[in-house]
Image: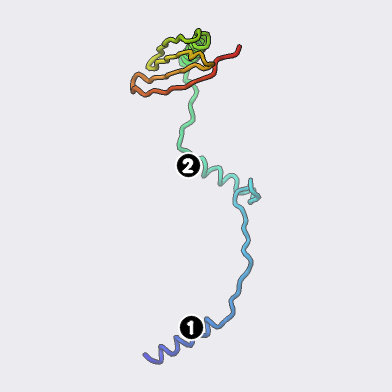
């Protein structure tokens, strides 16, 4: 056993006594955008696609669905413009209320160059208050 300890001590000493050898460390980017190998691009794209967590919105299946989406979008857009016109043409010190779906818009012209807009989600009761500058048009 003592001989084994001596041999292992000698071997360890010889190993530690040798000079340390090193070479320079070189960084090579993987992504071709940053100077990496251009053949990595298809592999990196495939990995990114595999990690994507959201689904892309599919186009409507038929013309009926497309028509319904277009009409709904147009009605909401026109309603938004009418409400914005009412809000910004309200005389100083006056206000009003508009309800669209589950959302109530309360507005008040403060007379200080600002309009206070209170948006309330009627289903949850959550409220957001915003003060916007009056239109100078």
The residue sitting at 39% across, 19% down in the picture is: 120
Report if residue 67 is visible in the image: no
The residue sitting at 62% across, 49% down in the picture is: 39
Return the residue at label 2.
Answer: 51
Dot 1 alpha-carbon crowd within 10 angstroms: few under 14, some 14 to 19, many 20 or more: few
Report if residue 112 is visible in the image: yes
Of the two numbered discs 2 and 1 on the same chain, state the one appearing first in sequence: 1
| Percent x, y of residue 87 | 49, 11
From what the image shows, is residue 126 above or below residue 85?
below
Q: Which residue sits furthest bottom?
A: 3
Q: Nearer the viewer, residue 47 or 108?
A: 108
Q: Nearer the viewer, residue 6 or 137?
A: 137
Task: State the CA–CA distance, disc 2 to disc 1.
Answer: 49 Å
Chosen colour scheme: rainbow
From what the image shows, is residue 98 above or below residue 124?
above
Name the quadrant of the C terminus: top right
| Percent x, y of residue 76 | 47, 13
The residue sitting at 48% across, 88% down in the picture is: 10
Return the residue at label 1.
Answer: 12
Name the quadrant of the N terminus: bottom left
């Amino acid at each position: 056993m003592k001989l084994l300890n001596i041999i292992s001590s000698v071997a360890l000493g010889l190993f530690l006594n040798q000079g340390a050898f090193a070479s320079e460390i070189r960084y090579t980017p993987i992504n071709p955008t940053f100077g990496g190998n251009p053949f990595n691009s298809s592999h990196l794209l495939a990995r990114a696609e595999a990690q994507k967590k959201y689904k892309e919105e599919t186009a409507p299946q038929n013309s009926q669905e497309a028509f319904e989406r277009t009409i709904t979008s147009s009605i909401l857009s026109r309603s938004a413009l009418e409400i914005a016109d009412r809000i910004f043409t309200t005389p100083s010190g006056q206000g009003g209320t508009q309800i669209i779906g589950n959302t109530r818009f309360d507005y008040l012209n403060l007379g200080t160059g600002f309009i206070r807009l209170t948006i309330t989600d009627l289903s949850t009761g959550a409220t957001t208050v915003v003060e916007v500058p009056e239109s100078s048009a």
